[in-house]
Amino acid sequence: MFALGLIHLESAGIESRYALVSAQFETLLNAAVDAIILIDSSAKICIFNPSAQRLLGYSEAEVVGKNVSMIMPTQERKHHDGYIQAYLDGGQPKIIGIGRVVKAQKKNGDLVSVELTVGDVKSNQGHYFVGILRDVTVRLATEKEVQQQREALAYASRISVMGEMAAGIAHEMNQPLSAILNYSKAATNLLSNDLKSTEEKLTTASNILTKIAEQAYRGGQIIQGFRNFVKHKEVEKVGISLQDLLYGALELVALDSRWIDVVFEMQGRECLDEMVQVDIIQIQQVLVNLLRNALDAMQSVSEKKVALSVAIEDDCFVSIKVSDSGQGVDLSIRDQLFEPFKTTKDSGMGMGLAICSSIIRSHGGSMMVVESELGGAGFLFTMPRYIDETV
Amino acid sequence: MKQCKPKEPLVLVVDDDDAVRESLSMLLDSVGISTFGLSNALESFAYLDKHRDEVACLILDIRMPGMSGIELQKKLIEEKLDIPIIFITGHGDVPMAVDAMKLGAIEFLQKPFKDQTLLDCVNKVLTQREKTLEDMKEVQAVQDKISQLTAREKEVMGLILDGKANKVIAFDLGVSQRTIEIHRANVMKKMGVRSVAELARIYYVSGPDIRAT
């Protein structure tokens, strides 16, 4: 499309837009939904199509011949000429051929989110750049809404999982509480024992108090673990080692009393120091969900085995696989597993895997059913590796 | 855990949670009850198999990795290792509690429990054990005495306990009354009693039914 116009431009010179643009090309420019702006190598605007005028509120006469930085947010204006020069001096393109979402400033000062793609055109007369701007305000708002709904759903699902795990949590809390009670009473009995020396009493009492404090701390940790899990907060992708990520999830799953009978194996330990960039709670939610599914699937089998295997897939992704020795996945429903409201359980909404898969997709990864070497079901998902931006 | 002198009644505390197990042992220790702690059911079974006589009672957690508390209880019953069990659990699991009690558990306590509730249970078991041991001693003593009797003396004792007079016994056995009088005197002497009433008491409280044999 542009080739046509630009051949014409080159043959005619760049003095006047009206002289330069053929009737056909002008029709295309006028009809385009996207804003199209052509600048020369000194960043002066040459073409500013009607969609650009509508989007940014300037008339053509107001912008032609002026530096394109006028439609950029104030704080970025001063850098733009430098970017062009760096590119013309043989630098790596920062935006050409890549495209990204940026802010453009309207005549009235408002900022608008646009997806900007830039192409460069080299000719005898010089170097030109064409920018196509698509208003993505609505798209971004929709995406944000979808994301919020996904988060709300994930949150609701976590609450529901916690409800199912309430008995386990209560049990786990009762352990340190029991210990605290017993220790306290033992100390009381000891202190009122006249047969023991004061020194002996004090040493033992102090020893017992330390143990009581440890148990109170342990109780606090249990509460902290599941309180984090049900916290409703903005998704935040941070760097975390696989070790910490997996350990947190396993601690939660261990609250389920059925976990006690499971022979658990961790494979790919050498990868555990690897960092990933994820929302910790959401990925732990996925792990808890998959591990609890494994427990459900192994109810009626005598050999209960679960393996968690970690591997580095490539430069960008790591994979985690959860395998069990349960009854496995029926081939006929394999393709529908990640659809909402599909379930093989007597109780359950059939939302778990749909939510897991959606969480993984929102992290740029993917989730699939795979073979399990333990004879039951296998689920594998990928996650982005952590990129240290400061390096 | 405190290792105890043999033969001192011992409470075996079995819980996979280190803190619960240790704190229970400390609690019992603090009131002068000796304990031994183990973290799983299999080890406990092996221990009980060896030290049956020293263990007065078992405080047993229900849920443990590997063999559960209930499974241990069943195994002990199968192996005729009859040891009083006090179950402790973090779950309020009613069906499990019912099972355990049906199989003869002394008590089913939900964690966290009041120390006094547990101590009362343990003390009840220990008192019962002491009484049983005394009874057994008495039984043993009577049995020892009975084993001193000759077959004829045992026969005569059975008939005395039936309330028969010397001459009736003499007639029944086809011997002289004088012979029976000598047998009777020997029975009374060997059994360490002075009257038939006393003989009947120690015999019926502690003695075996010799007439069946």
Image (cartoon, rainbow, N blue to C red):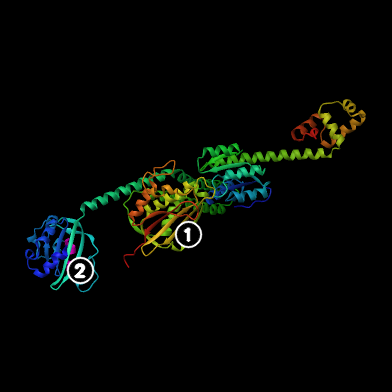
Which chain does tag 1 point to? A
Locate the C terminus of chain A by quadrant.
bottom left
Question: Which residue carries the number 1 mark?
Answer: A267
**Secondary structure at numbered mark 2:** helix
- Tell me: B81 left or right of A190: right
Q: What percent of the width, then of the height, locates residue B95?
A: 53, 38
In the image, residue A127 sits, relative to residue A332, either above or below, namely below
Residue A156 within the segment the image draws in magenta: no
Quadrant of residue A57 within the rendered picture? bottom left
Q: What percent of the width, then of the height, locates residue A7?
A: 13, 68
Quadrant of residue A5 within the rendered picture? bottom left
Amino acid at dot 2 = Tyr
Does residue A13 appear anywhere in the picture?
no
Q: Nearer the viewer, residue A83 or B80?
A: A83
- Mark 2 to mark 1: distance in Å? 48 Å
Q: What percent of the width, then of the height, locates residue A243?
A: 43, 59
Q: Magenta residues, as a range? A: A72-84
Which chain does tag 2 point to? A
In the image, residue B3 sits, relative to residue A42, either above or below, namely above
Residue A74 within the segment the image draws in magenta: yes
Q: What percent of the width, then of the height, locates residue B172?
A: 88, 27
Q: Nearer the viewer, residue A67 or B142?
A: A67
The residue depicted at 93 percent of the width and 29 percent of the height is B176
Amino acid at dot 1 = Gln
Query: In the rendered structure, which disc, 2 or 1, sits on the residue that comes first in sequence?
Result: 2
Quadrant of residue A38 within the rendered picture? bottom left
- Which of the labelled discs sits on residue A83, or is there none? 2
Q: How many residues crowd around disc 2 within 10 Å: few (fewer than 14), some, or many (20 or more)?
A: some
Locate the N terminus of chain A by quadrant.
bottom left
- Tell me: B4 left or right of A44: right
